[in-house]
Image: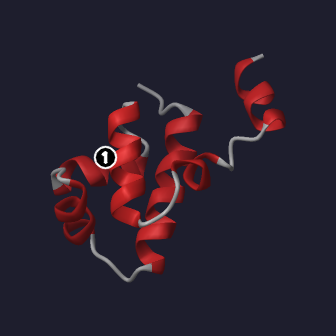
Amino acid sequence: MPKAREAAIFGEIVRGVRKEHAWTQEDLAERAGLTTTYIGQVERGDKVPSLTVVLKLALALEVLPSQILETFGFAVMREMFQ
C-alpha cells in the first residue's frame, strides 16, 4: 500500500525535531509513552497517528502541536486533497 503523503511529511518533521534534540527513537518513545516500533513507523510514514499521538509527540518533543503541523499550509493541503 502506498504511503499517504501527509503521513510521510509528518514523519519527516517528527524525525527532524527528534534529531535536533539528538535523541534516538528509543528516547522519543520513552518520553512519549509509545513503542520504538511505532515511532519508527510514524517517522517512515507507515502510520498515520491519531490526534492523541500527535499531542503526545508534541509534548515529548517539547514543541506545540501547531509547530509540527505548520508544514501543512493551505496550499499544501489543497494540493493533497483536491
> How many tags in the picture?
1
Which image quarter holds the C terminus? top right
Give the side of residue 69 with respect to residue 33, left or right. right
Q: Position of residue 24 (x, y in %)?
A: 27, 74
Residue at the spot 22% in from the left edge and 64% down from the top edge? 31
Q: Which residue is mark 1?
A: 41
Q: Residue furthest right?
A: 75
Q: Position of residue 77 (x, y in %)?
A: 73, 30
Q: Is residue 65 visible?
A: yes
Q: Quadrant of residue 19?
A: bottom left
Q: Quadrant of residue 25?
A: bottom left
Q: Is residue 48 visible?
A: no
Give the side of residue 33 with respect to residue 67, left or right. left
Give the side of residue 81 with respect to residue 46, left or right. right
Q: Secondary structure at mark 1?
A: helix
Residue at the spot 37% in from the left edge and 39% down from the top edge? 46
Which image quarter holds the N terminus? top left
